[in-house]
Amino acid sequence: MSQVSITDIAAAAGVSPSTVSRALQDHPRISPARRQAIQALAQQMGYRPSQVARSLVTGRTRTLGVVITDVTDPFVAEVLKGAELASRESGYTLLFASSDRDPDREIEALRLLLDRQVDGMIVISGRAGSRYAELRSAGEAGMADWPLVLVNNDHTGPGIYSVRMDNAAGAHEAVSYLRRLGHQRIAFLSWIEMATTMEQRRAGYRQALLEAGLVLEPELEWEVRGYPDIDLDALEAELTRPGRPTAVFAANDQLALAVQRVARSLKLAIPEELSLVGFDNLEISAHVDIPITTVAQPAFEIGRSAGELLLYKIKKEVTHFQTRILPVQLVVRRSCGVINQK
């Protein structure tokens, strides 16, 4: 069965193709009654507009580009779900490319999506930082012509917006909770490659310790390789040093799960000998043997907010902020306990 065309609808309605075209685009020169009649007839005949033809008229492809760090990252997957829902509700589709956490590949992925004529871009947990503002100001490859929304990145500027959660506040709440349980030596664990989000979480960790009157100990700020595999040997070395901390605040749940795995191999009981807090609230964190206390990061809502903000900007609607910051929530589970004072 061949696809119904505007010409077919025009013949059935007894009007010109240009009249049908105007009616389908809600053109003001067509009376409401005729417009409704033609639209009803088009629906009855099973007409589906050509996206290619529409893009030639409107200058838009109704496609959003998304650059992700890693398609296997559970956080990224949830953000994508939220962005996809916001896009679908507005009649847009997503086209994405992966950077494998490499800043240069991230820019290459962005250029690739621009070549596909996307109407706007979302970058999730990117590593390129301030390079976006530099590229836009230079006007490279038409980059100044479309809006960009960064997820978990504060490098905003003209045409560049951001959606993230309050990372510093989340870290502060996690460490303050450990302090209320009596812990004084609390380690902070992050990737060696310190992304913006982890910098903010480290700042919150430090602030909570200082407010508690504790001295910052550089030897308790641990960094391990996290991609493509977490360096478990480095974690084991930290957990077996003299003067081991009584608690670990991990900058994300993937790292917290790694700590739990190494602690199990060392026969180090959680939470009796080591309390543990993560960040992100990945689904798996609630279903391991010792469910992990964590800071809930509303990944789906972050993605949906990023998609909605990008669509506002594509439609040139007014928003009165560059960055939207979502609130945090500490989810208490069994991985934390009162410090053993023996």
Image: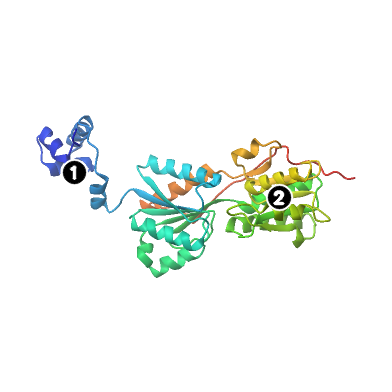
Q: Is residue 278 left or right of residue 217?
A: left
Indicate the position of residue 157 as horizontal and vertical percent values. Answer: 47, 63
Indicate the position of residue 38 as horizontal and vertical percent values. Answer: 18, 35
Where disc 1 sits, the SS reads helix
Q: Is residue 152 left or right of residue 44?
A: right
Crowd class of label 1 (few under 14; some 14 to 19; many from 20; radius 10 Å) = some
| Residue drawn where x is 80% and y is 57% of the image | 214
Report whether residue 316 is seen: no
Disc 2/disc 1 C-alpha distance (Å): 60 Å
Quarter containing the C terminus: top right
* Residue 265 occupies quadrant: top right
The residue pinned by badge 1 equals: 22
Q: Nearer the viewer, residue 60 or 311?
A: 60
Vertical arrangement, residue 292 with respect to residue 202, above or below: above
The residue pinned by badge 2 equals: 249
| Residue drawn where x is 38% and y is 58% of the image | 112
Q: Is residue 161 left or right of residue 11?
A: right
Q: Nearer the viewer, residue 25 or 186?
A: 186
Indicate the position of residue 290 as horizontal and vertical percent values. Answer: 71, 37
| Three-letter code for the amino acid on which mark 2 is drawn | Phe
